[in-house]
Amino acid sequence: MHITLHHLTKSYDGQTPAVQDVSLAIPAGQITALLGPSGCGKTTILKMMAGLLTPTGGDIRFGEQSVLAIPAEERSAVMVFQNHLLFPYMTVGENVGFGLKMRGLDKGTITRRVSEMLDLVKLPGLEKRRPRELSGGQQQRVALARALIIEPELLLLDEPLSNLDAHLKDEMRELIRYIQQETGITTVVVTHDQQTAIILADQIALLFEGVLHQVARPRTFYEQPASLQVAQFFGGVNFLSGTKEGEMVHTDWGCFAAAPSPLPDGPVWLTIRPEQMRLSQNGVSNSLPARVVSQTYLGTHTKLKLVAAAIPLEMRSPDPDSCHFCPGDTVNLYWPPDKTWLLPMERE
């Protein structure tokens, strides 16, 4: 089932919008991540989709049908909250089967479906345990099983990994992706973590302060960010201001070629990710002399912090053995044109 948000708006005080004019197409059978910092409106959107909040304006469509007048329990959508909200006095099996019991299914069917769901979330045989006897990761899996057993058409996950240790996050990402591919359910994940969004999602919707800034496949956010703010959120640190003239950008540090851009001639930001920057010989075009500030060995790569005419820059070399510099050394940085992107110079 595909979902469409049309100019969705939500204000809690009648004045300041928590979500402002968000329009988004959520493809059927894929994972969409609502990504952004805390307080940007992600969970508010999720709750409006679930029917737990009423929009101030706009529309939500499941397929071609508006669901604004449909109560939460009739929307064929289920939400798994950040805190698992398992019933502590029930066993795992009773928790998972609760939705089917409320629907009046017979005990044999419930037992069979509970077993299938626990197999799906890789917790076979734990029907008799209590939630307090489970780890945080296991509790999250039980919450997923409880949501999926009623066979919803839309799965809504609110920060599903925020309460887990680092090693459990990897396991849960793999499990969520596995479950989605096995069931084909349309899934929306709320997260503030870029890595989670990149690993899980088929498409990412990035929000700041209730406003949708960019919707794209994960790789696009690294290679073609839509704005300076988007680039910075995804770890961009290298920015030069300049003026675009045709296919070239003129800066105070030289003239640079960049990847083709639809931006008009005029003021722009020039950016390249640290892992795409290279060292070069003096005199090579698209290069910039810089002074080494620090060098940090990180096992798989070496991070160089540099400065060029008071502009802080960063480079990450995939070959740690090739970087042996001391603070104060001068190096020549090369900006590969096909990895150099132009961003609009946002007005104050």
Image (cartoon, rainbow, N blue to C red):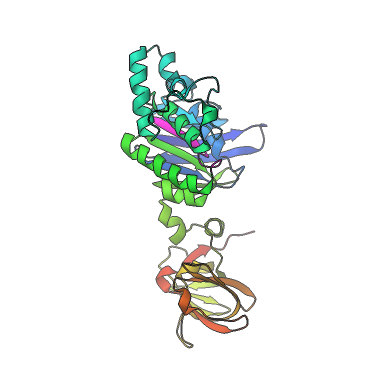
At horizontal 48% and vertical 69% (from top left) the residue drawn is 301
Q: Residue at x 40, y 28 (%)?
A: 148
Q: Is residue 159 magenta?
A: yes
Seen in the picture, residue 4 relative to 205 is either above or below; the reply is above
Vertical position of residue 45 compared to residue 213: above or below: above
Left or right? Give the position of 64 relative to 68.
Answer: left
Percent x, y of residue 154: 41, 31
**Residue 278 at least partly seen:** no
Give 278 or 142, whichever is nearer the viewer: 142
Q: Image check: 134 left or right of 121?
A: right
- Split into 4 quadrants, where in the image is the C terminus? bottom right
- What's drawn in magenta, residue-wise? 154-164
Residue under the image location 45 percent in, 69 percent down: 276
- Left or right of 152? Residue 235 is right
Image spot of residue 4 (x, y percent): 42, 35
x then y, percent, for residue 81: 53, 32
In the figure, is residue 217 to the left or right of 299? left
Comparing 177 with 306, the one in front is: 177
Q: Quadrant of residue 44?
A: top right
Q: Quadrant of the N terminus?
A: top left
Magenta span includes 184: no
Q: Residue at x 43, y 32 (%)?
A: 155
Work out whether residue 134 can be spotted: yes
Viewer-proximal residue among 255 and 114: 114
Residue 109's x, y, as percent?
33, 16
